[in-house]
Amino acid sequence: MTQILVTNSEGRPGVGKTAEMLAAGHGGLDAIEAGIRLVEADTSIRTVGRGGWPNLLGEVELDAAIIDGNTFRSGAVGALKGYLHPISIARAVLERLPHEMLVGEGAARFAHETGAQTADNLIPDSERVWRQWFEEKVSPDDQRKWPNVPLAELCQQAIDPEKGMDTTVFLSLDGRKEIMAGVSTSGWAWKYPGRLGDSPIIGAGCFADSEHGAAACTGAGEMAIRAGTSRAIVLYMKMGLSLEAAVDEAIADLRRLKGGLIQRITLHAIDRDGRHRVVAVNAEEQLTYWLWQEGEAEPHAEPAEIIAL
Ligand code: GLY
């Protein structure tokens, strides 16, 4: 068995830190949290943390989750406003509460209680783009009544969601042979307030089982929620499928989705023997991911497979 770390392309600011920690013998949960914190703080990553795109009201709502593949203890936060590191608040849910997920005001209340760092996550560039959308797409009458207007129609016309539906995902098999996963995102740009994607939903956006493997998704979270994609991949491995076949089976599940949002979704998976597979389903351009394996000096980028539904 060899240690392995897989992150998607958005993991760039943190993948080196996580690999370094794994190589130094740290456990996966600590290494993943430390790496994701760097992604969340990097404003050049526009779909995670500070710098992430806002919802329809121009507010940045963040989602994150982390799961321990030994115990299946998880922690998740959804629609969290005003904090810099949702991954650490998710970790605190895992460690300090008898719950697995907190959302909205409850998540913010808990974040305050843990002394988590606050942040104004709407950076000037995001505010500028949101305001331009507001002035161009919201009728003068609704602008006057804002925010007390119906949002459903505006949500249907949101800006290219493909731009803003990415995430960062980290999967690790560490030196203790333990498998962990963590994810963090600002979700769908111009989403309806309160919308949760797959990321905070354990089993949809990520799952880990130290006896079998881990999986995580980026892209159209609505698809991963409907198909329970991350849990499905790991369960297919538990039921005896190879990593390759488990991912194929999850793609077959996605093919059965009818109606709703069908877009690009990227599946990332590792198994307990240190194999991995990353498949971009419905991608219109080449996507890359980051890979580090035990013995390598640093992570390197690899092209994802591309498959159409
Ligand atoms: N995959 C991230 C989201 O849909 O919010």
Image (cartoon, rainbow, N blue to C red):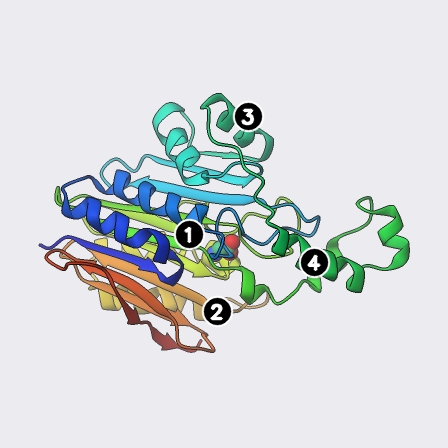
Q: Which residue is mark 2?
A: 264
Q: CA distance from mark 3 to mark 1?
A: 24 Å
Ligand 1 contact, mark 1 (Cβ < 8 Å): yes
Q: Which x, y percent locates residue 8? A: 36, 60
What amino acid is found at the position of numbered circle 4 in the picture? Cys
Q: CA distance from mark 3 to mark 2?
A: 34 Å
Residue at the farthest front position: 124
Mark 1 Cα shell of 10 Å, populated few (<14), some (14-19), many (≥20): many
Q: CA distance from mark 4 to mark 3?
A: 28 Å
What amino acid is found at the position of numbered circle 3 in the picture? Arg
Instruction: Mark 3 or mark 1: name the one nearer the start of the chain.
Output: 3
Ligand 1 contact, mark 2 (Cβ < 8 Å): no
Mark 3 Cα shell of 10 Å, populated few (<14), some (14-19), many (≥20): few
What amino acid is found at the position of numbered circle 2 in the picture? Arg
**In the image, which disc is placed on residue 256?**
none
Q: Which residue is mark 1?
A: 205
